[in-house]
Image (tube, coloured by chain):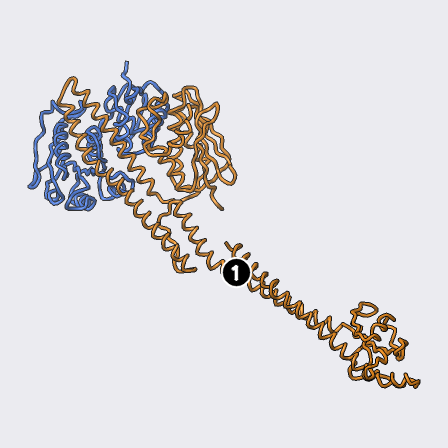
């Protein structure tokens, strides 16, 4: 599906055995990383390859425009030659790929401008692979609904595509934030997600305020699910979905 | 200042009036009275010389005939009488003319008698000896009414009084005008300084009005405000820039460590987890600094906020967590519509409730109340924690202030030490105030006074 092009280097996926995250699988989908900072660019390439993606890289805007089609474009907005938002618009005009903007700016106005320029999502530095891969999967689900899979855990069913939650086949109405929290926990039941990871996933990374707000939403979520024991608090670390007996 | 200038001007004017105008009036009155008495004496003398011939005749035994009534020296209602050398009346005067024998005797001895009388009519009585050669042959008495003199004196004082009044009015008008001229630019400067103090850094004073000294002062103020503005804005951009610049290397470091984490095994993963934890902390600090920089950039844009509704909503959101910790979350709120920038009070309440939940032990309680306090609205959050020492309260709004590490309630996972600094800024940018006090039997009370929405 993806074709390498001049100006962009393409490398194949590494041995899937070394992929981070047990739930990751080698998809063979093509990710174009547009990043001028060599340190970040190199790590992104390595991490995405381990997760099973084919990765090509461009170090500036002109290279990016010459690159071939990709399934997902990871676009750093702070490039030396072309304004990030302008490049985003041009890429959007010529490609159906999902665009995830990478930015150091967390203000609401900057995030809105990014989405308005055609980006499907954004991720704010400094991010980790857990969040990055989750966002890549999310945009791919949106492009290709067939890829979406319902997450099941005992009586609980979470559907990321329709954003529905069922407990024993009964609909549970959640706020968007509560859904996001439950979705990250349900992706890998039993695994502990740290507070930091959950905050990054559910609050677009860099929300600043009392981190207690996370506990507030968890408390409310537990109530709505009707089974307080379903979400376990791991003191000093984070949360996880309780194992089923 | 207006009062001082007015007092100085009026004092000067009154001193001038009392020191110059009053003595002038007194002198003038004195002069008029002298002239009056001189004229009366002259009239008596003229009458005496006219009467002299007849008195000489009378000495010789001839009767005094005719009248002196029409003598040209006499004017208006002058009364007169003539006495012989023996003191007897030769020409009797009317009843209004009261002359004592002692006065006649004194005149017969060669003196001129002058006496101011009130009865039976206000006036001056003059007795003048009449000489024939060097021999005194009789006495003439003239009583002249003082009415014209009194009128003259009254109109003199009236004139002087009016002049004084005009001078006082003029001084008042001038001093008020002067005070305004000097005072208005100073008042404007004061208002500008007030607004600058409240954080409106672009405010400048007018340098085109008022006396040169004030204009110079306004210029100096503007220079200061300009420097302050550029200093503060460069400080803020510095904080934001540094935070931005830190994010890229932080991202690279984090990604590298995460990849390394998958490559190594055993004891090294523990170390890497620790390093990743430190990076997370650093990231949170950078986010916090950016949040502070952003909140310090906020300009007040107050809208009408229903504080009672807002408190109800935030408390409802926080209640499930409070219940999990077996903490009672109580509210008491009257009607309160306040003026605040949209979103600020939500953040303030979230931060305060988070702090309160951190320090309140199980089965404790947290109270959120809203009530009128003088002409302001007071929002108060009281926890059941250990409170703070006076020194801690003083430091609490500073950046990077956290509860001391040995504090039993300190939650190491939360608190970058920026929460209260942000709350402080969010409250003060809308003109509110925030204070911390210990409540005996409870814990810490955070008191926020907000302006009610006008109109």
Find residue A235 and report its horizontal and vertical position in percent: 30, 19
Tell me the quarter of the picture where residue B145 sits. Answer: bottom right
The chain coloured orange in the image: B
Q: Does the image show residue A171? A: no
Residue occupying the far top of the picture: A245
* Mark 1: secondary structure: helix
Find residue B283 and report its horizontal and vertical position in percent: 25, 32
10 Å neighbourhood of mark 1: few (<14), some, or many (≥20)?
many
Find residue A195 and report its horizontal and vertical position in percent: 28, 26
B374 shown above or below A22: below
Find residue B355 and report its horizontal and vertical position in percent: 38, 28
Q: Does the image show residue B99? A: yes
**Residue B192 versus residue B326: which sits nearer the camera?**
B192
**Residue A13 versus residue B276: which sits nearer the camera?**
B276
**Residue drawn at 32 percent across, 22 percent down:** A167
**Residue drawn at 73 percent across, 74 percent down:** B36
**Residue B403 versus residue B314: which sits nearer the camera?**
B403
Q: Chain of mark 1?
A: B
The chain coloured blue in the image: A
Q: Is residue B13 left or right of residue A56?
A: right
Q: Is residue A92 left or right of residue B385?
A: left
The residue wearing badge 1 is B175
Residue occupying the far left of the picture: A6
């Amino acid at each position: 599906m993806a074709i390498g092009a001049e100006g962009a280097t393409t490398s194949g996926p590494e041995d899937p055995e070394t992929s981070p995250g047990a739930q990751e699988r080698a998809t063979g989908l093509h990710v174009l990383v547009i990043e001028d900072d060599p340190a970040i660019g190199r790590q992104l390439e390595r991490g995405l390859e381990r997760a099973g993606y084919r990765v090509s890289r461009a170090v500036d805007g002109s290279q990016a425009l010459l690159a071939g089609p990709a399934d997902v474009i990871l676009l750093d907005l702070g490039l030396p030659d072309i304004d990030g938002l302008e490049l985003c618009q041009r890429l959007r005009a010529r490609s159906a790929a999902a665009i995830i903007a990478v930015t150091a700016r967390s203000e609401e106005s900057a995030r809105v401008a990014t989405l308005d320029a055609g980006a499907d999502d954004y991720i704010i530095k400094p991010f980790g692979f857990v969040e990055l891969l989750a966002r890549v999967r999310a945009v791919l689900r949106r492009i290709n609904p067939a890829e979406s899979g319902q997450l099941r855990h005992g009586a609980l069913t979470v559907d990321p595509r329709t954003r529905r939650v069922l407990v024993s086949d009964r609909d549970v109405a959640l706020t968007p934030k509560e859904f996001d929290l439950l979705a990250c926990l349900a992706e890998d039941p039993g695994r502990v997600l740290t507070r930091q990871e959950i905050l990054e996933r559910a609050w677009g990374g860099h929300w600043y305020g009392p981190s207690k707000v996370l506990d507030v939403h968890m408390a409310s979520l537990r109530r709505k699910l009707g089974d307080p024991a379903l979400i376990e608090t791991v003191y000093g670390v984070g949360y996880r979905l309780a194992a089923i007996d | 200042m207006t009062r001082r200038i007015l007092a100085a001007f009026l004092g000067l004017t009154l001193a001038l009036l009392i020191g110059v105008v009053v003595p002038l009036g007194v002198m003038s009155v004195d002069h008029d009275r002298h002239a009056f008495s001189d004229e009366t004496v002259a009239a008596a003398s003229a009458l005496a010389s006219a009467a002299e011939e007849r008195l000489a005749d009378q000495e010789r035994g001839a009767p005094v005939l005719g009248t002196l009534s029409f003598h040209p020296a006499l004017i208006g209602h002058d009364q007169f009488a003539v006495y012989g050398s023996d003191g007897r009346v030769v020409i009797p005067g009317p009843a209004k003319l009261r002359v004592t024998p002692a006065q006649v005797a004194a005149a017969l001895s060669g003196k001129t008698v002058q006496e101011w009388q009130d009865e039976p009519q206000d006036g001056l009585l003059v007795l003048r000896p009449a000489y024939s050669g060097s021999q005194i042959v009789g006495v003439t008495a003239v009583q002249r009414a003082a009415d014209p003199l009194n009128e003259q004196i009254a109109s003199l004082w009236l004139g002087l009084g009016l002049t004084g009044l005009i001078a006082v009015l003029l001084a008042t008008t001038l001093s008020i005008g002067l005070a305004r001229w000097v005072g208005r630019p100073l008042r404007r400067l004061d208002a500008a300084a007030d607004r600058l103090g409240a954080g409106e850094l672009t405010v400048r004073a007018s340098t085109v009005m008022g006396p040169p000294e004030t204009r110079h002062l306004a210029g100096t103020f503007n220079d200061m405000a300009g420097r302050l503005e550029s200093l503060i804005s460069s400080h803020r951009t510095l904080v934001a820039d540094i935070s931005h610049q830190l994010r890229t290397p932080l991202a690279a470091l984090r990604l590298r460590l995460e990849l390394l984490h998958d490559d190594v095994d055993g004891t090294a993963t523990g170390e890497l987890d620790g390093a990743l934890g430190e990076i997370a902390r650093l990231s949170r600090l950078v986010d916090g600094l950016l949040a502070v920089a952003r909140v310090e950039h906020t300009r007040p844009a107050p809208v009408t906020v229903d504080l009672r509704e807002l408190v109800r909503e935030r408390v409802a959101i926080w209640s499930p967590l409070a219940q999990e910790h077996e903490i009672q979350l109580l509210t008491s709120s009257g009607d309160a519509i306040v003026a605040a920038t949209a979103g600020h009070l939500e953040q303030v309440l979230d931060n305060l409730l988070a702090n309160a939940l951190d320090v309140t032990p199980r089965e404790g309680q947290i109270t959120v109340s809203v009530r009128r306090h003088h002409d302001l609205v007071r929002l108060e959050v009281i926890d059941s924690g250990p409170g703070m020492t006076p020194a801690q309260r003083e430091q609490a709004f500073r950046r990077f202030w956290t509860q001391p590490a040995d504090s039993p309630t300190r939650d190491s996972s939360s608190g970058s030490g920026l929460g209260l600094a942000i709350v402080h800024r969010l409250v003060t940018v809308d003109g509110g105030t925030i204070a911390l006090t210990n409540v005996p039997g409870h814990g810490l009370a955070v008191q926020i006074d907000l302006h009610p929405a006008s109109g």
